[in-house]
Amino acid sequence: MDMRAFATLAGLALVGATIFTILSFSAAPAPEPTAYAARRETLQERLKRLPGDYRGWAQLASQYVDQARITGDPSYYAKAEDALATAAGLNDRDDAVLTGQAALAAGRHEFAEAARLAERAIDANPYGAAAYGVLADARIQLGDLRGAQSAVDRMMDLRPGVAAFSRASYAAELRGDRDGARRYLELAHDDAWLPADLAYARYYLGELALHSGDLKTATGWYAKALQAYPAYTPALAGQARAAALDGRLTEALDLYDQVVERLPLPQYLIEQGETRIKAGGRPDWTLLRAQRRLFQAAGVRDDLTWAEFEADHGDPAQAVRHARAEYARNPNLVAADALAWALFRAGRPGEALPYAKEATATGWRNPLLSYHRARIERALGRPARVDPGFDPALSALARFS
């Protein structure tokens, strides 16, 4: 799943991976909370002084969700839940509290609940742009692209800016409108002034170039993202991705070592493992499995990651189980593709084809989805073109992070 579906409002609270990571209020990372300490009272200090500040508790919860995303440590979700429980105990109808609850639900991949809570927040305050952002993200994950577009449009009306433009870009991309997606990201870039927002827009301009096969342009955007915000780990991962796809495997592995040291998210660990296999080595999935247990213990339901991993590197039967569970909860394009590929890898291409068609029905020009559908159709004796430039050994690198 694309990181633009899981972003944060600059000034409130970085983004994280994939589909893998986590949704909050806006589009990109803000400065670390400690950056404020020398200039003004910290939020924790304010809450000690004013324990009845329910909006402050909601903001603290937002920061914890962001920290889970920034650090890869899902234990922050429990802290966010506690802060939101305090906020709701003071005022369970406030739109900021409800939006915070929606963001936490989305962080745990409970997108139906996230949408329900975001809609309650909008009922409480129809002019709260942040709630529309959460709603748009949740509806995309639920496969409701029309509803997501409606939420994005409303957000654009209320607060055009980095958060709204980035979501509009993703919506355009899912329709197959790559040029439109690029234009919206350029608008986000033009609107950005915080270094983190600049890094975010430049990173996704790099991702668009990467997935259209333009590795040189992609590498340039990733470098510019890191110039703006050196701590922006997704851009470092982008550099590793581009190097691997360009055949510079030693360089890519050096970069991935830095990435996973900073942020050991499952997406990055899988990319690193596939690059190591491509280089002739053997991956060690120990840390990946440890991360899986941590996320499960924190209440994060991420069957999608494990469906994709098991299909490519493990047990296809387990992949089917995970993919069915994900698709049942969140019937989006990526979940449909994961189920199609899991069924194919389990030797059931006839069952796989309807899901592969569903995954590619909107015109989204995603090289991984196209490759999966072509392989499935070929297995059924149908003519299908497999892109000769696509490297199935590095399939995780073609996923949108």
Image (cartoon, grey):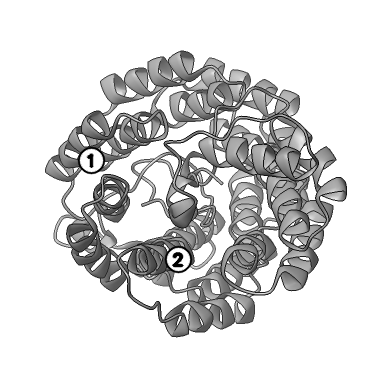
Q: Which residue is mark 2?
A: 270
Residue depicted at x 40% and y 51%: 15
Q: Nearer the viewer, mark 2 or mark 1?
A: 2
Spot occupied by residue 120 in the image (x, y as percentages of width and height): 75, 42
Q: Nearer the viewer, residue 381 or 17?
A: 381
Spot occupied by residue 180 in the image (x, y as percentages of width and height): 47, 14
- Dividing the picture into quadrants, the one containing residue 386 is top right
Q: Nearer the viewer, residue 99 or 113?
A: 113
Q: Is residue 344 left or right of residue 14?
A: right
Q: Is residue 316 left or right of residue 393?
A: right
Say which amino acid is labelled 1: Tyr
- Dividing the picture into quadrants, the one containing residue 310 is bottom right
Say which amino acid is labelled 2: Ile
Element type where label 2 sits in the image: helix
Residue depicted at x 51% and y 33%: 387
Q: Residue furthest right?
A: 351
Q: Which residue is mark 1?
A: 222
Mark 2 neighbour density, 10 Å: few (under 14) some (14–19) many (20 or more): many
Q: Is residue 93 visible?
A: no
Element type where label 1 sits in the image: helix
Residue depicted at x 80% and y 62%: 325
Residue depicted at x 44% and y 32%: 163
Q: Is residue 378 left or right of residue 175?
A: right
Q: How many numbered tags mark residues here?
A: 2
- Dividing the picture into quadrants, the one containing residue 136 is top right
> In the figure, 205 relative to 381: above or below?
above
Q: Nearer the viewer, residue 27 or 42?
A: 27
Spot occupied by residue 51 in the image (x, y as percentages of width and height): 50, 68
Q: Is residue 258 visible?
A: yes
> In the figure, 246 relative to 83: above or below?
above
Mark 2 or mark 1, earlier in chain = 1
